[in-house]
Structure formats: structure tokens, C-alpha cells
Image (cartoon, rainbow, N blue to C red):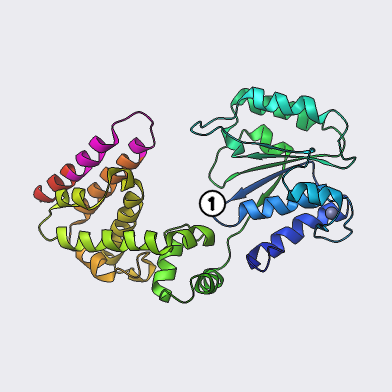
Amino acid sequence: MIFNEYPWLKLPFEQLAETIVNHRAHHALLINYIQGSGEEELINLIANRLLCQSSKQLEPCGKCHSCQLFLSQHHPDYYQITNEQGKQSIGIDQIRNISTKIYEKSQQGGNKVIWIRHAAFMTEAAANALLKTLEEPPENTYFILSDNHNSQFLPTIHSRCFCYFLKIPKIEESINWLKKIHNDLYSDNELATALLLSENAPLNAALLLQPENWQQRKLFCENLLKVLPQNNFWQLAKTFNHEEFFERITWFCALLGDALKAKQKVGRYIVNRDQVPLVRLLATKSNDEIISLYQLWLKAKNLLSINGLNRELIVYNVLAQSQLIGYQK
Ligand SMILES: [Zn+2]
């Protein structure tokens, strides 16, 4: 069972599965999560439990025909809807396609499950179409809607669902978990940093700690240490490919946030616990300078999320302007 791998999912699963065992499961479950906290694994298991036709326990049996179909990803009564690649919307046709199917009898004689991933991407028309179904749900049909915790849903969708927030584990628990999967490769400070840079979501922190990724961040920090004294931001352009700028913005903004905390003597709240010398160096800049840099880099992050803009130009522009901020002292 996945709980050996992701122990913090046990309690949420049990809470949700209990309603299934007691035949009280809500026909529309809305799961909010922090990306990288095990949401996919949890939802898969819930869907599996809803489709299992043999288990009387919380967990699916894993052996019945329905479980086998599910595990081989061929269950005919299991549907997944999500945004198409590169698109930030789920259209009404995607919802309508499913709606016609779910009013028919299930093919395996059990429940039907529809998982709508990134559900906040539903257009208003799509959400309204879904709403009609949720108001008069067909028998034995269960919807699971899922999305990131800060996504916006129509209030009418919210009100029709049982809302559940998947909590992230405590930081100590995550640190122990990360230690195990990375074979004690990193110090506690590094593990805590990776978590804090990942909204404390353990799976995302684990990804950031993959040696090639972590090395990239380390190098970025080392390069900053070199260019900052001469305010030579332009030099950074040589140290990474412009496609790799996005994550560097996140890292740099976290460092700037830390520099402000260090200035206000609340250093114990800093994120980059493995980069204290760099944070101190940034903290020698004035508040105004730090805030201007922060706003400049954050703006670039928004620009980079828009398709069709010249990404290389955005990167060069940020670096050139960062340099100017230093000269305006
Ligand atoms: Zn089963």
C-alpha cells in the first residue's frame, strides 16, 4: 500500500474511505492540495476504493476484477478529465462527453468515477454544465474534483461538493522522510530549505533535491555571491540557459525575502538556511533596493507565464534592470 511510501496520506485516506465503507460518500468530492503533497497518489487510491467491488475494509482489495481493471488503467467506468496540454482550460465539450456516458448503466455493474483534475480550469460554461449533473447526480456515480489550494472555483461548484483539504505533513516528519529517500545525502538545513522553497510539499522538495536540480540551485547561489559585490548581474546571463530562468526567479525572490527578514532581525524565519552568507550579503542592500529587485523579478515571472513572448529578451531585460537598480543608490 502507498502508506509505506507516503505515510502522511494514511489519515486523509482513512477519513475519506470511511465514508465509502459506511455508504455515506458524497457524490462530489473537491480536494484542494498543495502541489507535491501526494495528491495524485491519494486520489488514485480513493478512486480505486470507490470502484473496488469486493473490499469491506477501508482499503481496496486489489484483487477483484474491478481492482485489476483499475490497476491496469483499463477500467471502463473510470473517467479522467483534465486540461489539454498547453491549454489552461477545460471546455464544455469535455464535460458534455462525460455527462452522456454517466447516465448509462456502469459497464462493470459497480460505481462510476470521474476525476476532474485541475478542475478550476473549467470554463464557466463547463462548470455550469457540470453543475447540472451535480444537482441531479446519476446513481452510483462519484465525481472527484481536484485542484491547487489557491485556485478559484465558482461558488456554486463549491457549494455542491464535499470540500477536503489535503494537509501537508509537519516539517519534522517531512525532513525525516526526505532523509530516507535521499540516503542522508543532505544536511538538515538543506532539507528544510528545499521544503520551504516548495511550500513544504514533500514530493516537490524531493524533486528539488534531485542531485542535478540541487546542484543547479547551489551554482546559482555561488554565482550570485560572485556578481553581487560589483553589482554585475549581467554576468549571470552566461551561467544559465534562458529556459531555466523561471525557477531561478523563485530562488532569487526567496533570497530577497530572506534578506529583508535578516535586516529586520527575524533571521530565524529565513527560507534559505543553507545560504546564510549570501543572505547576509543581500541584506547589505537598502530596503528599497531589495524591494525593487523583488518586484522586477516577480514581474518577469508573470511575463514568462504568457505564451508567445520573447523569453530571452525578458531575461536580458531583468538582468540589465537589476544592474541599474544597484547604480541608483
Ligand atoms: Zn477490489
Q: Quadrant of residue 258?
A: bottom left
Q: Residue at x 25, y 41 (%)?
A: 315
Would residue 37 appear left or right of 221 to someone viewing this image? right
Q: Position of residue 32 (x, y in %)?
A: 61, 48
- Taking the image as drawn, is residue 14 in sight? yes
Count of numbered circles on the image: 1
Mark 1: secondary structure: loop
Q: Residue at x 27, y 46 (%)?
A: 241
Q: Is residue 51 magenta?
A: no
Q: Residue at x 65, y 67 (%)?
A: 7
Label 1 CB, ligand 1: below 8 Å? no
Q: Is residue 305 magenta?
A: yes
Q: Which class describes the residues within 10 Å of circle 1: few (<14), some (14-19), or many (20+)?
A: many
Name the one closer to the observer, 10 or 158.
10
Kind of residue indicated by mark 1: Gln
For the magenta stretch, what is the residue range?
Answer: 302-319
Q: Position of residue 41 (x, y in %)?
A: 65, 55
Q: Position of residue 238 (x, y in %)?
A: 19, 50
Q: Main secondary structure of the magenta part?
A: helix
Would residue 99 appear left or right of 183 to someone viewing this image? right
Disc 1: which residue: 35
Name the one closer to the observer, 67 or 120.
67
Quadrant for ligand 1?
bottom right
Name the one closer to the observer, 195 or 4.
4
